[in-house]
Image: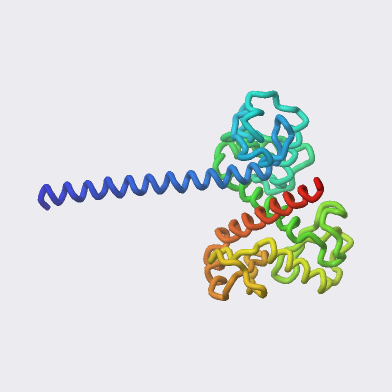
Amino acid sequence: MNRLTVFVAMVSVIALSHVATAQDAKEAAQLQKQQDKLRVAVQEICPVSGEKLGSMGEPLKVQVGEETVFLCCKGCAGKQVDPAHWATIHTNMAKAQGICPVMKKPLPEDAKSIVVNGQAIFICCPPCEDKITAEPEAYIEQVSALYTTSVRDQLRIAVQDICPVSGEKLGSMGEPLKVQVGEETVFLCCKGCMGKQIKREHWGTIHANFAKAQGICPVMGNDLPKTPKWTIVEGQVVYVCCPPCTKKLAAEPQLYLRKVDALYTAHLDKKAKEDSQRAQR
């Protein structure tokens, strides 16, 4: 191999290395953005003002002691954290987490927490702290998965809107109950509806709600037709513009479920804004 060939090969390796590094950095930035959105959804309110995060524009990421949290706006930067809002935020986090990531047990009511890499993680007992400290990234990843499920459940409750048995509004009878109906995961209004017959008219309304909130095929980006096809992806009904899209959904379920989550969120935000405008008239 002559010197020119060696030089060209070295340049190619360096160029590929830079491309790989840039790609890795881009993927890391996208992942961090997703994690931040997830934590904003779980935190829900500003620790200073108590305002809903997102209601004042893009939330501001800050450090409070060892923890990384979000403020509703720049106006809250440098101001005193309200103890009541701080407690609410940690209650929200514990509720979204639900279980100890080490022992996989439900968290006790007075669960203790440990802060790792800026994130509060709740545990069932003190010995779990050492295990989390030893492998922080592994347990942060587990908590993120629990957060994702919790946030997705809240979105689906809001979109589903009514109980498939009673037709009552979800949340009107306390915390909705997550159940399996065939391949689908749906929510009941209360334990009293457990094991009872699903009513066809309510089932039809629920699926109309899901289709309306989604609005767009997550694969092709097209508006859904009047009678869209659908498939079940990890317990969730997802509507598509044409049958071939179901294969793509099956190949990358989490990618398309995140897209459906975003469509649901946009629909609910628009609905909330319209409801607010009507109330002000």
Q: Quadrant of residue 94?
A: top right
Which residue is at the front of the view, 213 or 168? 213
Residue at the image position 81 percent from the left and 56 percent from the top: 176
Q: Quadrant of residue 259?
A: bottom right
> Which residue reaches farthest front?
281
> Horizontal and vertical percent for residue 238?
64, 66
Residue at the image position 67 percent from the left and 75 percent from the top: 227
Residue 123 can be seen in this image: no
Which residue is at the front of the view, 273 or 105? 273
Color theme of the render: rainbow
Left or right: where does residue 60 sit relative to residue 7? right
- Vertical comparison of 263 with 79: above or below: below
> Horizontal and vertical percent for residue 123?
69, 40
Which residue is at the front of the view, 165 or 269? 269
Q: How many labels were placed on the picture?
A: 0
> Which residue reaches farthest left?
2
Residue at the image position 58 percent from the left and 45 percent from the top: 35
> Horizontal and vertical percent for residue 15?
28, 47
Residue at the image position 87 percent from the left and 54 percent from the top: 173
Left or right: where does residue 250 sit relative to residue 48? left
Residue 47 can be seen in this image: yes
> Horizontal and vertical percent for residue 235?
67, 65
Q: Quadrant of residue 172?
A: bottom right
- Vertical comparison of 234 with 148: above or below: below
